[in-house]
Amino acid sequence: MDHGTGDEAVAVARQVRAASAEGLLLAVGREGSREAFAGLFRLFAPRLEGYCRKLGADPPMAQELTQETMLAVWRKAATFDPASGSATGWIFAVARNRYIDRVRRELRPEPDPSDPALAGADAHTPEAVVSAAQQGRVLADALGNLPPDQSEVLRLAYFEHRTQSDIATALGLPLGTVKTRTRLGLRRLRELMKA
Amino acid sequence: MTLYSQPRHHPDPDLLLAYAGGSLAEVKALFVATHLAYCPACRARVRAFEAQCGEWLEACDPAGADDPAVEDMLAAVLGMIDSGLPGEPPPAGRTPPPARLAWMPEPLRSYRGLPDADGWDEVSPGVALSAWSYAAGGTSARLLRMAPGAAVPAHHHAAMEGLLVLQGCFTDEYGSFTRGDAVTYGAGSDHHAKGAGVEDCICLLVLDADLVFLDEG
């Protein structure tokens, strides 16, 4: 039997998970399906707990944040719009906001989609919507296509909230190398935003 | 409703990534989020970064995930759902902002005391700082108002300064900035902002250190 190369198998597995996360989240939002919620829970709760631990939460706090995040996923699932982003990104954002609220004890300033003063809410031509979406895709592609050593330092800095010197220690690299990789990765993104 | 052009000056990807990933402290997050209210392209960029973070989340090692513990947690959460838990708590004591601020987008319009603080302190002819300010984590936020042609007095930049145009426009040696444009200046850089156009220019000003005006005697 041909299972393809390891990389392909990993990529296919990721696509299947992403598709199932979206299907499950939509079933929770549209039908209030408990089965779909249980599926999402088994998929994400262990990973959310692991992620909260990486951010520095102790085990009881990591469990609490995970439960609160999944409860918020149940409550807010109906507001998920697959046209405006991925299901996994949406769940990440719910967890991030719980973390900022409970651990950092800060507000999370966000634009209000129902605000009449929001640009693009009143005057979005189809062209403007498409061009904004393209800006997002360009950056997503760029992040996906960065050399792995650059993408790894960006992941540690922005996803795991680690300092440059912490990253250098974790990867066993000189601080200067970490700074260079970060600068090159950000420069690529900056160039694409100006294009 | 007036049609405005989209902003041409965006927050650096460092700020957008830190905002999407959640490491950005609150006052700078306010700066980014208020720019997002003007900028559909940056809203899409932040969503793209969130999607990337979602992929990284899926790739996370599960935390000592023995199956019984996950099933116990699931049962506990389903129990909370079944016990008819109260709905989402209403946003804490958020009063509708006054009509005089209708031109200003969220999240700035309702932010920490801003709706209740009226008034300006003039720092030089035609240039004023809002009576309102908020500081946390070493960064402060306030509003800066420049009359057309009025120049902000020379000041030290010991640390990062960010300006986001909310109304009108201003110019400095780096360019001309209009509604929704976000620009940041690094520590030690010099710039001389000056109100331009026909109406007062009002900006959200964020600073990583105290603002110290030079005594030009």
Image: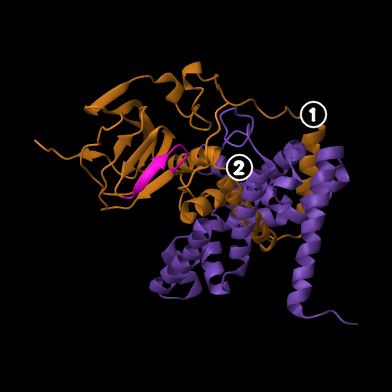
| Residue at figure coordinates x 70%, y 46% from the top left | A84
Residue positioned most to the front = B198
Residue A65 in the image: x percent, y percent? 64, 45
The residue closer to the viewer here, B140 or A114, is: A114
In the rendered image, residues at marks 1 and 2 fall on the same chain: no
Q: Colour of chain B?
A: orange
Q: Colour of chain A?
A: purple
Residue A165 bears which disc, if any? none
Q: Is residue A179 left or right of residue A86?
A: left
Residue at image mark 2: A98
Residue positioned most to the right = A1
The residue closer to the viewer here, B181 or B35, is: B181
User: Which span of residues is magenta-colored?
Assistant: B174-181
* Residue B176 is one of the magenta-drawn residues: yes
Amino acid marked by disc 1: Gly
Residue at image mark 1: B84
Residue B216 in the image: x percent, y percent? 12, 38
Image coloring type: by chain
